[in-house]
Amino acid sequence: MQSPPAGSKRRMDGSLLAADDRQRGQIKFHIRSGRLHKPGSSHKGGLLQRRVVITGMGLVTPLGIGVEDSWSALCAGKSGITEITRFDASTYLTRIAGEVKDFNAEDFMPKKEARRNELFISYAVAATRMALENARLEINSSNADRIGVVTGCGLGGLGIMEETILNIATKGPRRVSPFFIPMMIGNMAPGMISIQFGAKGPNLSLATACAAGAHAIGDSYKMIQHGMADAMITGGTEAVVSKTAVVGFNAMKALSTRNDEPQKASRPFDRDRDGFVIGEGCGILILEALDHALERGAPIQAEIAGFGLTGDGYHITSPCPDGDGAVRCMQTALDDAGLAPDKVDYINAHGTSTELNDLYESRAVKTVFKDHAYKLAISSTKSMTGHLLGGAGGIETVFSALSVSRDVIPPTINYENPADECDLDYVPNTARKTKVNVAMTNSFGFGGTNATLLLKKYTD
């Protein structure tokens, strides 16, 4: 066994208390993990378990550019869904989408870089700039290698791929931009964030369909918790309001065709729902170890309490009828947080406005929460933003954090006629001011990949 440093005393549990820290009681050296144990951390199974908090957030959504614009529109029950302007959709089965309006990439990055980026990358850089400013976090040579980036993206640069294939077919192979590949691949979102802001810690891109943004946040949470980084820039981004995406989802009969009433098209849990509405945008969060945030006096918005991820093992697009994968995912997050189901006040549901998802998620909530399922509040913010696919988990975690920090639950708009078995409290049509100590957010993707995050109010 390792010999104690001079002047140290050994505890009964095998940890060492250094002589110069005995009076302060602030730092312990854990013999198994070999890591410093600081305030706001614990050890579980010999691993460092640091508390992780949210200190900054940035949003680019169909509801607005920035956190305040998006949040105020959300709480007012406004829809960001309109007729498609990105291309001529007049002959398409679906002619509506949740497009980002009035976005100028040059407001957030040099003109040269803006021209070389596909939209999903530019959205990520823009939301990151907002989040870093919100967190008052400066990345420099002293901390760069302890700050990482993990983002999720479902389809990446589908738009530039579509455009390039058309160019090859009509103009020949010499008319392909040398930036085509970098613009297309999903990992250029975290890559460009790292380049623009100097974050040199872990760098990763996830492509787990509609769960990608939530998986990215969960992975970032675990990286900080176990000491791989002190802070992470994380979330989800997507920009695939394109011909290929719309035609592809139409072929699956997944999209709403309520073209004459765009703002009423996304109607989760409502009897008259007829499919999801594709959306675009980005949600980025700054996660930090609690000790790191306290040391620099950072603003703390909420705490990440737990993370769950599971696989259905059932079908390429349909969730399990009994919600098995979602049940295990939510329960895993609760177990990770050490929270009983009745401690959850609010669920930001996956709530896509598709027949099967809304039904099976409602069943899963009832299985996990039992009687408490009828006491907690549930809403789907997709009713206003549309479904951002890989970007959904990013913006919905931001919305959940705001619910926790501001004690407001955004509504599910267009909820007029309850669907069969969708009989829970979906916060219909009007935001609710109420205490939110713990919030859960769900993201479920094609292939049966699931993610659940738990957030709670920060307390000392």
Image (spheres, helix red, strand yellow):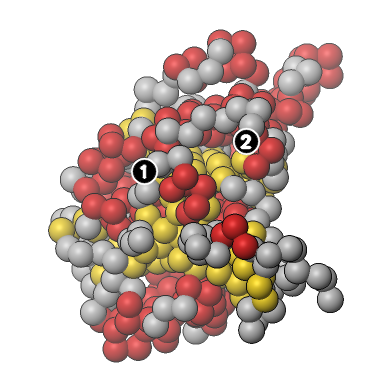
Where, quadrant-wise, is the C terminus in this rendering? bottom left
414 w.r.t. 124: above or below? below
Give the residue type that dot 1 points to: Pro
In this image, 360 relative to 374: left or right? right
- Rendered image: mark on residue 143: 2
366 w.r.t. 225: above or below? below
Sort mark 1 into few (<14), some (14-19) or many (20+) by Cα contacts within 10 Å: some
Q: Earlier in the sequence, mark 1 or mark 2?
A: 2
352 w.r.t. 96: above or below? below
Tell me the quarter of the picture where residue 81 sits: top left
In this image, 161 relative to 310: left or right? right
Residue 311 coordinates in the image, percent (x, y): 64, 72
Front-most of 425 and 357? 425
Front-most of 252 and 10? 10
- Rendered image: mark on residue 9: none
Q: Residue at x 37, y 48 (%)?
A: 300
In this image, 229 relative to 443: left or right? right
Q: How many dots with numbers?
A: 2
Residue 33 coordinates in the image, percent (x, y): 72, 67
The residue carrying mark 1 is 299
Q: Is residue 199 visible to the viewer in this orientation of the structure?
A: no
Disc 1 on helix, strand or loop? loop
333 w.r.t. 41: above or below? below
Residue 343 coordinates in the image, percent (x, y): 33, 77
Q: Residue furthest top?
A: 111
Sort mark 2 into few (<14), some (14-19) or many (20+) by Cα contacts within 10 Å: some
Tell me the quarter of the picture where residue 367 sits: bottom left
What's the CA distance linking mark 1 and mark 2? 18 Å
Front-most of 441 and 176? 441
Q: Residue at x 23, y 41 (%)?
A: 72
Q: Residue at x 31, y 51 (%)?
A: 402
